[in-house]
Image: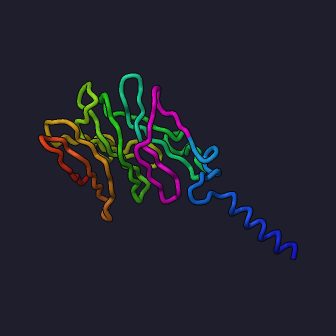
Amino acid sequence: MRTFISIILSIFTCTQLYSQAGELDLSFGVDGFIITELGESFDGITSMAIQEDGKIVAVGYSYGATHSDFGIARYNIDGSLDNTFSLDGKLVFDYDTTFSIPYSVVVQADNKIVVGGFATLNDTSIADCFALARLNSDGSLDDGFGDGGIIKLYIGTTHLDIIYSLQIQPDGKILAAGILFRSSRSICCYKV
């Protein structure tokens, strides 16, 4: 009888250790959250995706002293940085522009990571073109995608073109959706 009671108490105790609905999961990171520094100034997450193996891919911006770049981090299930991604779990890269910010991320079936947002053309913070990047699972840019892993899509001559959403079709093609600001705002969809 003691064994049965101790098993029930163990099960009850174990279920109490894991997070309940609306509570922080204390087994994740430190006390249920993580903070990761990428750049010199400030960073922010704009989107996340979960890989099939449970790893978390977070994308956002990393502001340096004069500009912003794409910032990407990959975490293990417990919230620790995944050191198999870009050697330390973190990656910052730009489009040879002043500002570039990602707003969406999706993971393909082969674990390649597709990131979409915007990039600028000149020394402004205006979103001039759709920006797409594809990374290999190890965090390196996929040379078989666009120009060295990067695509800049200029749809018009005016500004404010931003990818806000990405999806992978069953045939592996990438759908990118966002907005184009012209004389009136427009919704745009692009397939790669």
Q: Position of residue 120 (x, y in %)?
A: 26, 32
As for residue 47 lying within the magenta part, the answer is yes
Q: Residue at coordinates 20% horizontally, 50% vertically from top-left?
A: 187
Q: Residue furthest bottom?
A: 1
Query: What is the span of residues highlighted in magenta in the rendered image?
Result: 35-59
Scheme of image coloration: rainbow
Q: How many marks?
A: 0
Of 41 and 113, which appears nearest the observer?
A: 41
Q: Residue furthest top?
A: 65
Q: Is residue 128 left or right of residue 141?
A: left
- Viewport quadrant of the N terminus: bottom right
Q: Residue at coordinates 55% horizontally, 45% vertically from top-left?
A: 82
**Placement of 189 over or under 96, stated as above or below:** below
Q: Is residue 70 left or right of residue 34?
A: left
As for residue 139 lying within the magenta part, the answer is no
Quadrant location of residue 173? bottom left
Q: Residue at coordinates 42% horizontally, 57% vertically from top-left?
A: 110
Of 37 and 74, which appears nearest the observer?
A: 37
Q: Position of residue 38 (x, y in %)?
A: 48, 33
**Placement of 144 over or under 61, stated as above or below:** below
Q: Residue furthest front?
A: 22
Q: Residue at coordinates 41% horizontally, 29% vertically from top-left?
A: 63
Q: Residue furthest left?
A: 183
Quadrant location of residue 64? top left
Of 143 and 16, which appears nearest the observer?
A: 16
Q: Position of residue 159 (x, y in %)?
A: 19, 36
Q: Position of residue 149 (x, y in %)?
A: 33, 43
